[in-house]
Image (spheres, grey):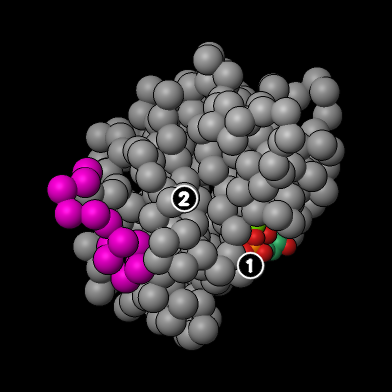
């Protein structure tokens, strides 16, 4: 089982959006993902509660709730057939919180938006993440997801310049699109929406899934093959490509 943690101490950067869409995309491709919700806001859990029963199943684990009848580790244990555990973390985690949330992770995904405030916060979060690593522990594999990107805006240039400062790959770039709020309201992922509606977004998800899970079967919606360095799997580097806004 692979463990992917979605983090960013900044609120509203797109952690839940990223976590639920990754889970839905993997499930649509035949995997058995589990979604561990560590955020007391319970947004990922609420999304799962709205998920239509005819959609591929995703196990939900309410990590923010303390069960009186089960030990914490039992409560957080995904089913034995789970292929990928995706963890949605809350905003505001400090260095110790980040260390705890990312312990044992195979990969960390950080959605970053392009405002000055978001970039400043992301810099601190990355520093905390790296400084929180214990010496001798396995170095963490981090990928950035440039989120809510609008083409050729000052924000997109700012984000591009910021990302150049780090030796961290930009795994994919997500457009600013109402498709994300629309699909979330229905309990589905963007890759489960009608193709004509999400055509411009699918490629970005193919890139992300290929980084996370190279053996993943591309679903009927995501029919174009992903080529190039992403096939290398976790750790593959994708050039930042700004896409057009809807
Ligand atoms: N690429 C996108 N395009 C349009 N809207 C987006 C995009 N990504 C996220 N959003 C919207 O931004 C809002 C915040 O996103 P989300 O809840 O995923 O952030 P978060 O980091 O989980 O927030 P929190 O820190 O409060 O948990 C939501 O309304 C979501 O639908
Ligand atoms: Mg959230």
Q: Position of residue 228 (x, y in %)?
A: 27, 39
- The residue lying toward the viewer, choosing from 29 and 123, is 123
Label 1 secondary element: loop
Task: State left or right for residue 41 relative to residue 141.
Answer: right
Q: How many marks?
A: 2
Label 2 secondary element: helix
Q: Which residues are magenta?
A: 126-138
Q: Position of residue 57 (x, y in %)?
A: 69, 22
Q: Is residue 220 visible?
A: yes
Residue shown at 36%/29% (left/top)? 214
Task: State left or right for residue 197 relative to residue 89.
Answer: right
- The residue lying toward the viewer, choosing from 21 and 96, is 96
Inter-mark Cα distance, 1 to 2: 18 Å
Residue shown at 75%/24% (left/top)? 55
Query: How packed is label 1: few (under 14 Cα within 10 Å), some, or many (20 or more)?
Result: some
Q: Position of residue 85 (x, y in %)?
A: 51, 32
Residue 221 sits in quarter: top right
Q: Is residue 102 above or below residue 125?
A: above
- Residue extending farthest to the top is 81
Identify the residue position indicated by label 1 in the image. Answer: 12
Residue shown at 53%/38% (left/top)? 86
Q: Which mark is residue 101?
A: 2
Q: Is residue 129 magenta?
A: yes
Q: Is residue 71 above or below residue 203?
A: above
Point out the image quarter for the C terminus: bottom right
User: Image quadrant of ligand 2?
Assistant: bottom right
Q: Is residue 197 visible?
A: no
Residue shown at 39%/55% (left/top)? 99
């Amino acid at each position: 089982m692979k463990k992917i943690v979605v983090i960013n101490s900044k609120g509203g950067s797109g952690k839940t959006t990223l976590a639920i869409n990754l889970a839905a995309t993997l499930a649509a491709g035949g995997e058995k993902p589990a979604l561990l919700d560590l955020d007391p806001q319970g947004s990922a859990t609420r999304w799962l509660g709205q998920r239509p029963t005819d959609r591929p199943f995703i196990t939900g684990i309410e990590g923010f709730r303390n069960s009186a009848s089960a030990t914490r580790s039992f409560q957080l244990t995904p089913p034995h057939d789970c292929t990928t555990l995706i963890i949605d973390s809350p905003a505001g985690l400090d260095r110790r919180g980040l260390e705890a949330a990312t312990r044992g992770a195979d990969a960390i995904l950080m959605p970053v938006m392009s405002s000055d405030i978001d970039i400043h916060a992301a810099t601190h979060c990355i520093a905390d993440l790296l400084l929180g690593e214990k010496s001798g522990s396995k170095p963490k594999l981090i990928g950035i997801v440039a989120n809510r990107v609008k083409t050729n805006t000052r924000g997109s240039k700012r984000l591009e310049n910021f990302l150049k400062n780090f030796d961290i790959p930009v795994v994919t770039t997500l457009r600013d699109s109402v498709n994300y709020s629309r699909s979330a309201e229905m309990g589905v992922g963007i890759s489960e929406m009608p193709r004509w509606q999400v055509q411009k977004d699918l490629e970005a998800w193919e890139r992300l899934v290929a980084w996370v899970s190279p053996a993943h079967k591309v679903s009927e919606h995501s029919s174009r093959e992903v080529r190039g360095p992403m096939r290398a799997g976790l750790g593959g580097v994708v050039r930042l490509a700004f896409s057009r806004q809807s």
